[in-house]
Image: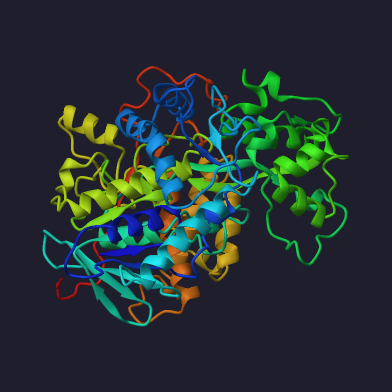
Amino acid sequence: MIVVGAGIAGLVTALALSEADTAAGPFVTILCKGHLGSGSTAWAQGGIAAAVTPGDSPAAHAADTRTAGAGLSDPAAVQVLCEGGPEAIAVLERYGVVFDRAPGGQRALGREGAHSTSRILHTGGDGTGAAIAAALIARLRERARAGLLHVREESAVADLLVSAGAAGRAHGVRLLDGTEMHADAVVLATGGAGQVFARTTNPDVCTGDGVALALRAGAAVEDLEFVQFHPTVLDQDAVCSSPAPAAGGGPFLISEAVRGEGAVLIDADGRRFMPGVHPDAELAPRDVVARAIDARARLTRHPVHLDATGLGRDFLRRRFPGIDAGLRARGVDWAVDPVPVTPAAHYLMGGIVTDLSGRTSLPGLYAAGETARTGVHGANRLASNSLLEGVVFGKASAEAIMAGLAAAPAAALSGTPVSASWTDAPLPSQRRAAARDGAQPVAGSGAAPAFPASGATASVPAFSRERLQALMWEHCGLIRTTEGLDTAAAALAAWASGPTPNGSSAPLSREQAEDRNLLTVAQAMVAAARRRTESIGAHHLAGDALPSPVPRPGARSAMHTTTSGSRTAVAGKESR
């Protein structure tokens, strides 16, 4: 078995697979593009959500998850996630994670946006992700030393190996150096795609690799238009002093848990504005808070600030030691002054379509974590559900593989496309309407006009990662327009047909491979956004009224955008 990715989902999957009782020796290899611990998991500040107290319940957690998802969450997936919460916490504790305790000895629980109660477990105050990653990596290395699994760092995957023919099956991977590795099953757990955007909270390894690999292999992806923008990232442009060298100049996230402890958002005049936007004020769903911050900043032409001064210096240092140190290193004393904040790309709700056991529409291929679209998050992720999803569905994927379950046929998976190119696939609702009316969907219907041929192509600057990121931030970011999405689609198409690594079969450098993946994901993301013509959750079109805080009844029906890649994965001889 091959697990691609070493965040929480990949680590849990690999550890669970390594615990299988097999006489054949180690049968799982985990591949990491960078070094262990370089992904998003270690950056997670807030914590992990789970209903673990007598006053809470998985049903209440599920209700909050569905509300945040704006009616597009899959109820069955949400139930699996939330009912699996207590066991997931027990699994992490068994692997060595020690969660914070209150003075009375009970678990210390925080509260974050759109949660109806305090249910966020944390470690080291705001160091939950780092603590979880450290514990899982320590256990992984221990099992590797015992010969129970293999770990390969600095091993980036260029493509999936897929057997030829209509009944293709994933049977391995090809690394950037041309090495082919074969396996009975491949699990993609490569994390998100935040590096598609100019402003992101994600580390530089988050280049959408898993989604791009799946698209090139012909697997179904869904809901790529739903990108969560975290509301409160330090607005470095508004900070007078330059960041200290040790702090780094990249985006610095300020956890939603800070608002959960009582910090408030204020405008340039020192006024709170969230109570007039949503009944939950600063603890509204993230998409609501992010748009409200953006709107207020545009209206006043001044940055919005997060005011945590009322919490006191001692509390801030004790509860949020990492954030406190990071802000002070950047010249900000948040115990005295409100902190300027702005949204940044944070999390991809969509991804590779899976069932509840991690199986994708391509036999032999599984996916878990942020790269997967399990159906849990709908149009907007509930805070601190991401770490939980990695544990619950990483473990489920491992269990399905170990049980030898046959891969589900493509038609059995919700959202699997019906012979449509990902660049012009109609919405499921459009396919149903066409079938009902006796009409055939028109290929390319609703697509952007072809890129102008009368010299306009030359007006698109040469491809670079920075230009792609700027394009996506401007035209497929927090607020979108039809015209902007058309502009993005045309520019991306020009780049994809030009001299880029996108179609190269030669060995690629890691940077070239990442650029190829970013371009693939950006095209699919824009295509999905263009097909969704109404605002919902994290997908918001300029001019639309803000969506109702309460999901519309039946909103989930016919409301998912599905994408499938052309089968361009490398074919190779299948072996086990």
Expressed as whole percent of the image width and height from the top left, the position of residue 505 reads 33, 78
Residue furthest out toward the front: 104
In the rendered image, is residue 500 in sight? no
Q: Is residue 531 left or right of residue 46?
A: left
Residue 55 position (above or below residue 125): above
Question: Which residue shows up at 41% across the image and 66% down it?
Answer: 142
Left-right relation of 100 to 325:
left
Q: With respect to residue 253, does 195 lie above or below?
A: below
Q: Between 515 and 87, which is closer to the camera in this rendering?
A: 87
The quadrant of the image that shows the C terminus is bottom left
Of the pair 274 and 185, the residue shown nearer to us: 185
In which quadrant will I find the N terminus?
Answer: bottom left
Residue 321 placed where, x, y %? 72, 48
In the image, residue 298 lies at what x, y percent?
Answer: 74, 37
- Going by the image, does 434 lie left or right of 109? left
Q: Position of residue 154 (x, y in %)?
A: 45, 75
